[in-house]
C-alpha cells in the first residue's frame, strides 16, 4: 500500500498482519487492538495515533512519525524502530520486549518510557533528551552515542548500563546518585567529580 490517507480512521482490532505500507498518513488513527505483526511501515505518519494493545510483534518501522502516539499495552516483541520521530510518544506499559527489540537513530525527546524493562538491550544513536525513564530497568543496557540531556532517571536501575559514548548533558551534584551503578568514561567521571567539588590529580 502506497501513500494512503487514513488519518483519523477507526481501525480498532483490524487485522493488518504483514501490512506493507510506504508513505501516507495514519495520523490520529484509532488502532487500538489492531494486528500489525510482521508489518513493514516506512515514511508514514502515525503522529497522535492510538496503538494501545496493538500487536506489533516482528514489525519494522522505518522513518515513521510516531510523535505523541500512545502504545500503552502494545505488544512489541522483536519490534524494530529505525530513524523514527517519537517526540512525546508514550511507551510506558508496552509488553513483550525481548533482546531483539531495537531502537536505532530515533528521536525520543520527551517520550515516556517509565517503568520499562529494557535490560540487556542496545539503544543506538537515539536522542532521549528530557525523556522519562523513571523506574525503568536499564541494567546492562548499552546506550551507544545517545543524547541523555535532561533525561529523567529517577529510581531507574542502571547497574552496568554503558553510558561511555553518550552525551549526559549538564552534570550536577545529583548526577552520581542518578547514575549509580552505570559504566562511564574517564572524561565523564572527571566531570562528575568536578560537579561534586572534587579535584582529580594524576
Image: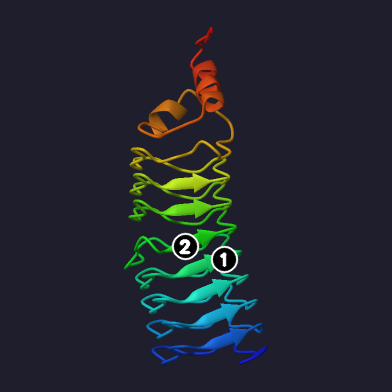
Q: Position of residue 95 (x, y in %)?
A: 32, 67
Q: Is residue 93 above or below residue 141?
A: below
- Whether residue 62 sits left or right of residue 98 in the image: it is right
Regarding residue 7, the answer to whether it shows in the image is no
Regarding residue 110, the answer to whether it shows in the image is yes
Residue 84 vs residue 140, the one in the foreground: 140
Residue 165 vs residue 88, the one in the foreground: 165
Q: Crowding at label 1, few (<14), some or many (≥20) Cα neighbours within 10 Å?
A: some
Residue under the image location 46 percent in, 43 percent down: 152
Q: Is residue 87 above or below residue 12?
A: above
The quarter holding residue 145 reads top right
On-image quarter of the N terminus:
bottom right
Helix, strand or loop status at disc 2: strand
Question: Label 1, label 2: how many angstroms apart (C-alpha)?
Answer: 8 Å
Whether the residues at callouts 1 and 2 have beta carbons within 8 Å, the answer is yes
- Whether residue 12 sits left or right of residue 201 in the image: it is left
Q: Position of residue 114 (x, y in %)?
A: 39, 53
Helix, strand or loop status at disc 1: strand
Residue under the image location 53 percent in, 83 percent down: 29
Q: Position of residue 116 (x, y in %)?
A: 35, 56
Q: Crowding at label 2, few (<14), some or many (≥20) Cα neighbours within 10 Å?
A: many
Color theme of the render: rainbow
Residue under the image location 45 percent in, 90 percent down: 16
- Whether residue 159 sits left or right of residue 27 in the image: it is left
Q: Is residue 164 above or below residue 46?
A: above
Residue under the image location 47 percent in, 90 percent down: 11
- Residue 82 tag number: 1
Q: Which residue is mark 2?
A: 102
Q: Earlier in the sequence, mark 1 or mark 2?
A: 1
The quarter holding residue 4 reads bottom right
Amino acid at each position: 500500500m502506497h501513500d494512503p490517507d487514513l488519518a483519523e480512521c477507526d481501525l480498532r482490532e483490524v487485522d493488518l498482519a504483514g501490512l506493507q505500507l510506504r508513505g501516507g498518513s495514519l495520523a490520529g488513527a484509532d488502532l487500538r487492538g489492531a494486528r500489525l505483526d510482521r508489518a513493514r511501515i516506512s515514511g508514514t505518519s502515525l503522529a497522535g495515533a492510538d496503538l494501545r494493545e496493538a500487536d506489533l510483534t516482528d514489525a519494522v518501522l522505518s522513518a515513521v512519525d510516531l510523535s505523541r502516539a500512545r502504545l500503552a499495552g502494545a505488544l512489541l516483541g522483536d519490534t524494530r524502530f529505525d530513524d523514527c520521530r517519537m517526540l512525546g510518544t508514550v511507551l510506558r506499559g508496552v509488553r513483550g520486549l525481548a533482546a531483539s527489540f531495537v531502537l536505532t537513530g530515533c528521536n525520543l525527546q520527551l517520550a515516556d518510557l517509565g517503568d520499562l524493562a529494557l535490560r540487556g538491550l542496545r539503544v543506538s544513536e537515539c536522542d532521549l533528551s528530557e525523556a522519562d525513564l523513571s523506574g525503568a530497568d536499564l541494567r546492562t543496557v548499552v546506550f551507544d552515542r545517545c543524547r541523555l540531556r535532561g533525561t529523567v532517571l529517577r529510581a531507574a536501575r542502571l547497574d552496568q548500563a554503558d553510558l561511555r559514548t553518550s552525551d549526559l548533558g549538564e552534570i550536577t551534584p545529583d548526577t552520581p546518585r542518578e547514575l549509580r551503578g552505570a559504566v562511564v568514561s574517564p572524561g565523564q567521571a572527571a566531570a562528575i567529580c568536578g560537579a561534586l567539588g572534587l579535584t582529580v590529580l594524576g
